[in-house]
Image (tube, helix red, strand yellow):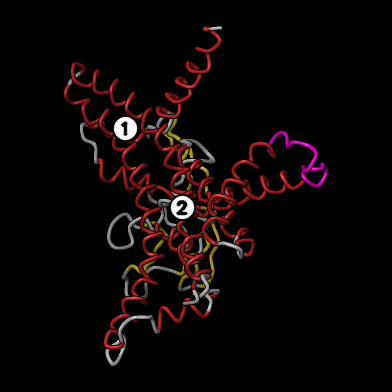
Amino acid sequence: MRGAMRRPGIISLLLALFLWCAPMPAAFAEDADEGSVDVAHLLFSHIGDSYGWHITDWNGRHVSIPLPCIVRGSGGWHVFMSSEIGHGHVYEGFFIAEEGPYEGKIVEFGPDGEIIRPFDISITKNVCSLMIASALLLALVLLCARWYRKHDAENEAPSGLAAAMEPLIMMVNDSIIKENIGKDYRRYAPYLLTVFFFILLNNLLGIVPFFPGGANVTGNIAVTFVLAMCTFIAVNVFGNRHYWKEVLWPDVPMFLKFPIPIMQVIEIFGLIAKPFSLMVRLFANILAGHAMILGLVSVIFVTVKLGPVINGPMTFFTMLFGVFMDCLELLVAFIQAYVFTMLSAVFIGMSRQEEHAD
């Protein structure tokens, strides 16, 4: 019995070690062989977006999945694969800038020889990961809905995927949405449930070091901005009369709102601060987690020059701490999805409050 109980722990430890070692980029090792490691460059290159999905390096060759590039330059629309412009190649006048304000972006030379940025709607790594996460989320929802269509949920306990999803759905619906919004909660439940599972799924995929994971989607400020704007629209478009009265004409002494609209300015600033806090909180926490794990990886290769006496123990302790950080990232992935959904529900609930009778 004791041996059987140990096996899951051993398997979990081996899996964690594998997940920790797998994302170690070959670029670290290459730079270590050359005697220097540009940690900042490597961190930002792996955290940032890219036009191809790099898998690994094998025998000195880059193994990656090319993604479609769609740009509108001076000569019209162009569609080509990212492999055409990778590693310094030029295709139909387009190339990836290696330095300057457009570093890492597709550019071309203008009529005067200056580097200009074309209109770019390419399917980048983050966009591709968004599509994969959306497809997975849709598949999860449809599979659960299929089970409920074929079974009597009132008299039969859910099984399989439905059994795993129902507690999460009920937790979000009852403890977050219904608790914070009130009687009108059903109107917003589809949006908030979608937000929770979308963020959670992208957070979990970001921890997985191999395809289709590894993209830093929720650590991208553009993604968190769109999510925050969706909540901003839900709060302010569907806010009731009492909500807007408190914003434009709050119950405070007259000199605080007329002739100088001090309170109105403060309330409007609060309207902007709420989605801004949602955006930055999710972005910063996920980005910091990825940066810390990649920073731990870099320690192994930075200490190579110090010799095996120092590099050996540093590698061992770094890997142990890295496994701990990976486990912590699993918790952070859930917490950040929970916090974003809860605060969105709180803001929506505040905009739906009725005026209390005196």
> Which amino acid type is marked by label 2?
Tyr
Query: What type of secondary structure mainly makes up the magenta span?
Result: loop
Q: Position of residue 237 (x, y in %)?
A: 53, 75
| x and y, in percent, of residue 293 in the image | 34, 36
Q: Which mark is drawn over residue 51?
A: 2
Instruction: Give the residue at the far front of this rendering.
Output: 358
Give the magenta range. Answer: 147-161
Q: Is residue 217 above or below residue 250?
A: above
Residue 85 is situated, as x and y percent measured from the top left of the image, at 45, 53
Q: Is residue 110 left or right of residue 351?
A: left
**Earlier along the polypeptide chain: callout 2 or callout 1?**
2
Label 1, on which residue? 297
- Disc 1 residue crowd, few under 14, some 14–19, many 20+, Cα 10 Å: many
Q: Is residue 137 left or right of residue 333?
A: right
In the drawing, does residue 12 fall left or right of residue 34? right
Q: Which of 79 and 32 lies nearest the eye of the viewer?
A: 32
Query: How far, Cα to Cα, is label 2 from label 1?
Result: 24 Å
Tell me the tag on residue 313: none
Q: Is residue 157 magenta?
A: yes
Q: Position of residue 46 (x, y in %)?
A: 37, 44
Which residue: 48% across, 43% down? Answer: 334
